[in-house]
Image (cartoon, helix red, strand yellow):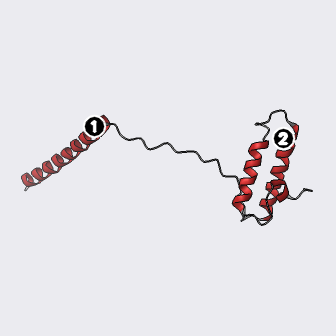
Amino acid sequence: MADDPYQVLGVERDADPAAIRRAYLAQLRANHPDVRPGDAAAEERTRRLNQAWDEIRRQAPGGVPRTPAPLTRQQPAARAYSDQQRDFRAAFTTATLRIALAVVALGLVLLMVGQ
């Protein structure tokens, strides 16, 4: 690649890896062919950005993440149980415990009768 990869990305050579990644992603979002369909200059710019990114990664394999991190999305909040679901769970748990207690009691009775 003839151009300086840091210059193509618009960062200083001593920039930290996170700043390099942010600059790459910001310029990629602005110049991607999907964002600018039919724009030959945007396609060329995207190609140059990708080449610069690959070259920087090769130069410092531990310093720059191998793949750009996905854009963060808010995780949906945990769904709270409705009152009806909560009541069902409580009733089911109570019934299960009662059955277990009855089985233990029956086992003790059979053990006493067997002696």
Question: Distance from label 1 to label 2 (Cα)?
Answer: 58 Å
Disc marking residue 88: 1
Q: Which residue is drawn at 73% across and 48% down?
A: 26
Q: Which secondary structure, mark 1?
A: helix
Disc marking residue 5: none
How far from the left and from the top, in percent, is residue 65?
A: 70, 58
How far from the left and from the top, in percent, is residue 23?
A: 75, 53
Q: Nearer the viewer, residue 105 or 22?
A: 22
Q: Nearer the viewer, residue 72 or 91?
A: 72
Q: Of the residues shown, which amino acid type is indicated by label 2?
A: Ala
Q: Residue at x 79, y 42 (%)?
A: 31
Q: Of the residues shown, which amino acid type is indicated by label 1?
A: Phe
Residue 7 vs 47, above or below: the answer is below
Q: Nearer the viewer, residue 2 or 98?
A: 2
Residue 44 vs 58, above or below: the answer is above
Give the mark, 1 or 2, whose residue is nearer the N terminus: 2
Name the side, left or right, on which 90 lies relative to 57: left
Q: Name the residue under label 2.
A: 42
How far from the left and from the top, in percent, is residue 94?
A: 22, 44
Residue 64 vs 84, above or below: the answer is below
Q: Which secondary structure, mark 2?
A: helix
Quarter of the figure that contains the C terminus = bottom left
How packed is label 1: few (under 14 Cα within 10 Å), some, or many (20 or more)?
few
Q: Residue at x 80, y 64 (%)?
A: 13
Residue 59 occupies quadrant: bottom right
The count of marks equals: 2
Quarter of the figure that contains the N terminus = bottom right
Residue 8 occupies quadrant: bottom right
Residue 98 vs 61, above or below: the answer is above
